Image: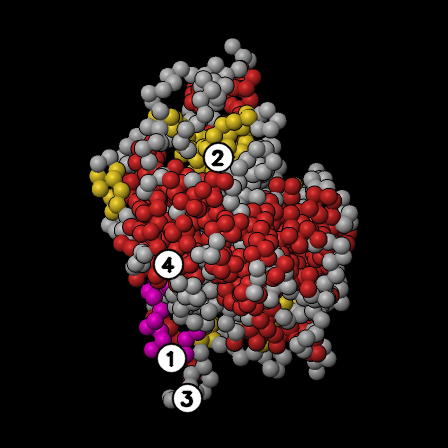
Amino acid sequence: MTKDPNKGYIALLGWSLNAVEAAETFDRRYIVVAPDWAEEYCQQHNIPYLSWNFERLNDRSMEIAETLKEKGVDVAIPLFEETVEWAGAINSVLLDNPRLYGQSLLLRDKALMKRRAQLGGIRVGIFEEAHDKEDVVRFLKRVNQTLLKLDGDPNDPIHLKAFDKAGCLGHRVIRTPDEVDTIPDEEFPVLMESHLDGWEFAVEAWIHNGKIVFLNVSEYVTLGYSVFVPASPELEKYRAQIHAQIEKLIKAFDIEFGLIHPEYFVTSDGEMYFGEVAYRPPGFKVFELLERVYGFNAYQASMLVFDPNSTEEEVKAFFPKEVVDADGFAGCFGVYPRRRVVSELRIPEEVEDHPYFESHELTPPAEETVTKRTAFGTHWGLVYFRGEDAHTLRDTLKAQEDLDYYI
Amino acid sequence: MTPNSNLQSPGADLLPGLLKKLDNATQQLGDAPDFAKPARLQPVMDIARRVLLQTGGCAAIEDRAERLERAGVFAGSDWAQPAILVPSLSGLSLKSADATTVVIEALSQLRMLAVAKSRYLHEGLSPVAARHFLTQVLALNLALLFGAPSEAERETQGRLAQIPRELFQHLATRIGFEHIIDELINEIWRILQQRPIQVEPVKQMITQISLCQSNPEIDLGTSGQGANRLVSALFGPTQACHEDPGVDVYQQRLESMDTAALQYEATGFARAMHDTGLVSPYHAVLLNHLAGQSDQLVAEALGLSATGRDCLLCFHDLIQAIIESSLMPTTAQGIYGLALMLERGILYQPPIAPALWRQLGLTLSDWSQARLFAAFGDSVPYRAKLMESVLSMLGQPLGIGQGNNPTCQSARALSMWSYNDPDYLLQMVTWAARDDEIVMHFEGQRISSKECVAGVAQTLPLDLDAVSLLVVPHLDRIYGEMGRQCIGREGDPHQWINPEFHGWWTGRGFRINVDVATGHLDDLDAFVRHFYASYHPGYNGNQPLIHPQPAGIAITDSAARFIGWHAISILRAATDPNGEMRIYFYNPNNDGGQDWGNDVKVSTAGNGERFGESSLPFAQFASRLYIFHYDPLEHGKLANVTQDELSEVISMIENSWGATRLPPTGAQASQSPTL
């Protein structure tokens, strides 16, 4: 793609092949900033590249910002949770706006994030930091006391999450004090949250000049297993409320541009609870799903709204109209082996023959014994579905949980 | 609540939806920059696989062939250059357990079809070439066209096994059955001209044709006429059995024939057999009927010349015993071996006749019986099965094949012994079949096949003739052990192994043009000149080659890329009918006719080859040679090969298998102007 020198020059922080592909086929200049293991690949394929190892911010952090500035880079986009504060630090230099760094730190720490949301008048569940197992036991008891439970009643669970990890990594559900013992000491400190009975969903919102330019609602069928876009009509009926919630969020975090990926619960009485927010592309390949139904490339959308040179007209022309412009529904399912010992990958015939089944990215098992899952674990690959009807898609995704892909 | 749930109902036509997905995935693949293509390819392959499983899926892919290729489904693979694809490999790809291999092969063939039908103008492939390719593929895989999946295919491929069948049905309908059959007939004749010992695959193909011809649903048009000789040679070569009446009926008919009628039958069988190299089961019935009655008619039935007839009369009792004990309808192929063995006159070598008597009475070990049972079942007496194979080997030394096994060394040794030292071969068969042990010596050290650990082949081969089946595992282990004893020596181990393994006549002088340590080409100039001096009658004082000599070949594919090292034996160097000097050699590979790229095409007939010989013009042969043996006491002097011919050979090496083996200095030298 020929690059337009009048448009922005963008740095992608972290290695994502799909992001690079999107940048390569977009009209903006770009450079990939990634660890040195990506160097050979980039050289081989003529991908503009700058080597950087994203460890904790340190004395040399200014160096990368200044190198990018010298090259004429306008803005940096974080692709992964670990590069969010780097983007904040770099953009505060590139855009001469020191507040951006502080903002990124808020977005990186789940405890700080919740406090800030609370201050902004957003409803959150009960939460607390835990430094050891005793903290967890105390919190579990207190939460259940609040719920007016008596001794012997089954506890409501609590959720434990790492402060600064993406998505489900390190996410545990604790119901009894006994389960607390299974948490390894090195996982502390963690964030503890009360369990909210409700419908969990995620949002991808692209923001330009402080305004939402595109808002997608991603519906979870089962957290950690499956998601689809756009959401079903039942969830989409909350769109106006969700829109208002996101505007509050933008205000609370003072977000002028970029892509945010928050998670919410909506309880049975229609109340929205804020879970957390990330300033980076969502996991579970939601970007791919969006492209499948709306036809736009979500990485390019992010480059567009990050680019300080983008005009409102260009942004407006880029995005389709939410929900009505979607051509069907697209979802994916994360496969976990269900057996302890597996020898081969076999796509179940009912999936193969399902008209909604699109493709999968599973690979044959490398080992026969399946490692026991801790916390929510990591799935072995995604299976993609697309179809005309949200309910059929939802039911299909749900049905996958009872199928063996690895036997 | 779910108005569209009927979409899920089984049996719904999935094709339109799948094609939409395929077009979408193809578009994404096409749009992706080169580095992102690999990730975009998997969905295309996966959806294409499901399309191919649907009725009408092949036609839909044919429609999209050009778009798929342009999007890059073949990029970076062999399939990207359709001109180099080899028809005989297609069947293997289609039977693979790996879905991607099956799908890409199917996509490639449907692409060929679009090209053949001139729907897709391809820059690297003409419609004629595409059509030729497809007819060959179909001819070679008739079983996939007409048969249901075998149990083995089902087990390894599951649902995938349907794809080749859907594909071949589509191809055959589009191209026309009549073209396939004619191509198949040519292919069968080409193979038969090499007179292989193992004719089972050929017989299967002929049976397929015969079934096609008698199937009223298949309209063969005017094609298939050339198959008549093949079908009749197997199923009804003579007047009295032309309608394939069954052996019992034929036996009855023989009882009432007079000499003239028998004479007529005998010549009919002999003609069919020598025409094709195939023997009809009825032939065995006749031969048994004649044996003991009339040597004259037996000679007639074997189609013998004066030499063979003489031999038959001299060893009358032995031949009669062989016919009666070993040549029955199920082992009829041995009749051809017997006839050719008599023609070779080897029975006049004193050890042969007694050795054959020993063979007739040989007690087979349990293990040998088990091996024969595993390969052939027990419908035929083991000893007769083995005798059939012994006769074939002695009659057709150059018809021995290695099967689908990496045991070219052992097959070459068997061929060389049959050719040059037949009583040694018979000794080997006895040791293997009776004693389960073969002993050879390597530089004075005794090597027993019983004590060796493992050979080249990982598993015991089954796709072989009975002799190879019993002897090759022993030879393979001994060969492996000789290799192990050479570990640590500098240079290529074949220089020590070959003479000890094959026989005293193998030259102890040894020349190799690859530096073993670096893998680089080494002193090509002297290597080539030495080879000419040793083997080329124009440079060696017009001395014909006396004994077959083992040699090593760098095998290249049809794009002249290196595939591997291969053992052959050089049989003779002589001028062909056009006056060109050629090397005639034996290739233990099952089909000698191979395209080695850059116009080096191994010929198996039409250039003065005897049955089973392969040949190449001298220079072309030299360009694929990497090892040869010579007698160190002869020819110290390198041949004064003309600069032109020398450069030609060297350039052919450097532009094929040697391309990646140029030594750092060699590359420079070849670039600098002639000094």
Report, in whole angstroms, how far the alpha carbon at label 3 lies from the one at label 2: 89 Å
Whichever of callouts 4 and 2 sits on the residue coming sooner in the sequence is 4
Residue type indicated by callout 4: Arg
- Residue to which mark 4 is pinned: B383
Taking the image as drawn, is residue A74 in sight?
no
On the image, which quarter does residue B63 sit in?
bottom right
Start-end of magenta stretch:
A167-190
Whichever of callouts 3 and 1 sits on the residue coming sooner in the sequence is 3
- Residue to which mark 1 is pinned: A176
Whether residue B598 sits left or right of residue B63 in the image: it is: left
Q: Residues within 10 Å of mark 4 (few under 14, many from 20)?
A: many
Q: Nearer the viewer, residue A231 or B76?
A: B76
The image position of residue A122, as x and y in percent, is: 58, 70
Taking the image as drawn, is residue A125 in sight?
yes
Kindly report which numbered mark, 1 or 2, lies closer to the viewer in this rendering: 2
**Label 1: chain?**
A
Kindly report which numbered mark, 4 or 1, lies closer to the viewer in this rendering: 4
Residue A386 position (above or below residue B572): below
- Residue to which mark 2 is pinned: B585
The image position of residue B498, as x and y in percent, is: 34, 35
Residue B595 position (above or below residue B116): above
Report, in whole angstroms, how far the alpha carbon at label 1 lies from the one at label 2: 81 Å
Q: Secondary structure at mark 3?
A: loop
**Which mark is drawn over residue A153?**
3
Report, in whole angstroms, how far the alpha carbon at label 4 lies from the one at label 2: 32 Å
Kindly report which numbered mark, 4 or 3, lies closer to the viewer in this rendering: 4
Q: Secondary structure at mark 2?
A: strand
Residue type indicated by callout 3: Asp
Residue type indicated by callout 1: Thr
